[in-house]
Each structure stands twice: as structure tokens, then as C-alpha cells.
Amino acid sequence: MGLVVIGLTGCAFVQVDEDARAVEVRKTEEEVADCVRKGTVSASTKANVGFIARGETTVAVELERLARNRAVNLGADVIVPLGPVTAEGEREYSAWSCPQ
């Protein structure tokens, strides 16, 4: 049973929607200086499965995928994290439309 739980904690269950695949992730807002800010998107996922903490990387990947999916609704093609992932599995991103 323990092996199954360990295996599951490493999986990312959120998929990037087809139209969100073009949404890029940048590290800093300096990288989007020539872009138009479209808003902010919030993402949250489970940081724990029962009493077991999920891997930080897994949680971060899921949050990024969720944010990319939501950015499309704002007409954005780039997102930038606004801070670290919280212990509760949350993160905010700024959403931008950038010239191609």
C-alpha cells in the first residue's frame, strides 16, 4: 500500500487544455515589459493526499497547468508567477498578451 501512495504523490493529474498549450510561462515580469497585462489568475490544488504531502514539483506543475488553462479566458498568452507556491497548494500568476 505504501508503494502505491508514493507512486501517486509523484503524478500530476491536471492536463493543459488544447488552446492553453501556446501559453508560455516566464520567470519575471521584466520579461514581459513589451506586453499588455490582462489580469491575474489564481490556481490551487491539493498539497496533501491524506496525511502525505505531495511533491513540491508536482504541485508546482499542476498549478502552472491550471494557470495556463485559465489565462486563455483572459486572452493572455504568457503567465508569470507572482510568488511562491503556498503550503496550501496555491499560487497567483499575472497574465499577459505579448506581441509575437
Image (cartoon, rainbow, N blue to C red):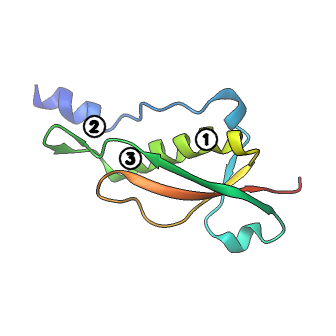
Closer to us: mark 3 or mark 2?
Answer: 3
Locate residue 18, reporting x and y percent. 68, 27
Pointer 1: what residue?
70
SS for dot 3? helix
Pointer 3: what residue?
59
Identify the amino acid type marked 3: Val
83 w.r.t. 78: above or below: below
Residue drawn at the location 42% of the way across and 30% of the way down? 13
Q: Quadrant of the N terminus?
A: top left
Answer with the quarter of the image where residue 74 lies.
Answer: top right
Pointer 2: what residue?
9
Locate residue 25, reporting x and y percent. 64, 54
Answer with the quarter of the image where residue 45 lies.
Answer: top left
Judge left or right: residue 7 versus residue 41.
left
Crowd tier of the residue under label 1, counting other residues whose Cα lies within 10 Å: few below 14, some 14–19, many 20 or above:
many
Residue drawn at the location 39% of the way across and 50% of the way down? 57
Locate residue 43, reporting x and y percent. 48, 47
Judge left or right: residue 43 versus residue 20.
left
